[in-house]
Image (spheres, rainbow, N blue to C red):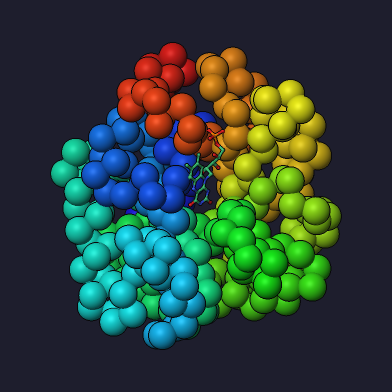
Amino acid sequence: MDDYMLRQRLTHSLFLSSMMRNTNGAYCARCGKGADMVQLGALLVAAPGEYMEVRDKYPHAFLPNAIDEMTERLSSEVKEIRSLLGNVIIGVNAGIFDIQEGVKMVSALTAAGGDILELNVHGGLKPFADIGFFEGMALPEYRERLLLWTKELSYSELPLVIKFHTSSPVDFEKVLEELEPFPVFGYHFNIRNEETKGPDYEFIKRIRPLVKGMLFVSGYIRSPEDIKALWDLGVDSIGVATPILKDENFLWELSKKVM
Ligand SMILES: Cc1cc2nc3c(=O)[nH]c(=O)nc-3n(C[C@H](O)[C@H](O)[C@H](O)COP(=O)(O)O)c2cc1C
């Protein structure tokens, strides 16, 4: 799907936001009715033989290194989704430990029929965030890695979305300015406000004018009123995760109230 078509379909849309250990192909297919996009993952890649402790801990999250095996694995997840949800947009939330493998993942996902790669600069996965992977890549001391990887991935075959958590102790205005030279398709912010237990509207008002590209948000967004308010503030696509763990029809019911 080309970028123009993706933009059209994602404007005022809903998505199933990735939940590691849950959002495989079967889960996305079951719970994604009503969503315009579903996200697989987090799926992880590392150089052969590296990060074995994470591989042991999350065996199903890791993709094989050989490109044909990687493609086969992603194809089977994509097929499972398409068999129930047709041409829904399919993203992969990618936890990357090695950029060559990340680039390979984009090729494999393209061959598998996926649509968007979301670079995970969001999750904790301690201690890796502390050494500049995942959420840690947003930190000033590891920002160079974020910029280099963004450069590699934003010029690859698939549109790139970068996902951040607003609780990261970073100046997002500066981060967005530093990322501006690259053709990033969009940004996903987890806007959970732990004080109000609602979405952080103030953050969105501040950040929207600075985001060049599509704006995806998730975090404590539960009601049709929240969704409409966020669309009105210029958010393009709204993700839901936690409520789906309890009610697999959550997105379908919500979509009927806002579409
Ligand atoms: C069980 C669980 C697993 C998650 N795993 C991931 C993940 O692998 N990658 C990621 O970027 N976000 C992950 N998230 C975050 C969600 O995608 C989403 O951004 C966040 O939960 C806010 O939405 P919510 O309030 O609707 O749950 C996870 C959330 C939950 C509840």
In the image, taking residue 116 as reference, residue 153 lies left or right, namely right
Q: Is residue 254 above or below residue 122?
A: above
Quarter of the picture containing the C terminus is: top left
Residue at position x 61%, y 56% in the image: 124
Is residue 40 or residue 245 the one in the foreground?
A: 245
Residue at position x 31%, y 41% in the image: 28
Q: Position of residue 29 (x, y in %)?
A: 26, 40
In the image, taking residue 28 as reference, residue 136 lies left or right, namely right
Q: Number of labelled discs?
A: 0
> Would you say residue 164 is visible in this rendering?
yes
- The answer to which quarter of the image holds residue 229 is top right
Residue at position x 23%, y 75% in the image: 69
- The answer to which quarter of the image holds residue 192 is top right
Q: Position of residue 238 (x, y in %)?
A: 53, 34
In the image, taking residue 112 as reference, residue 205 lies left or right, namely right
- The answer to which quarter of the image holds residue 203 is top right
> Would you say residue 116 is visible in this rendering?
no
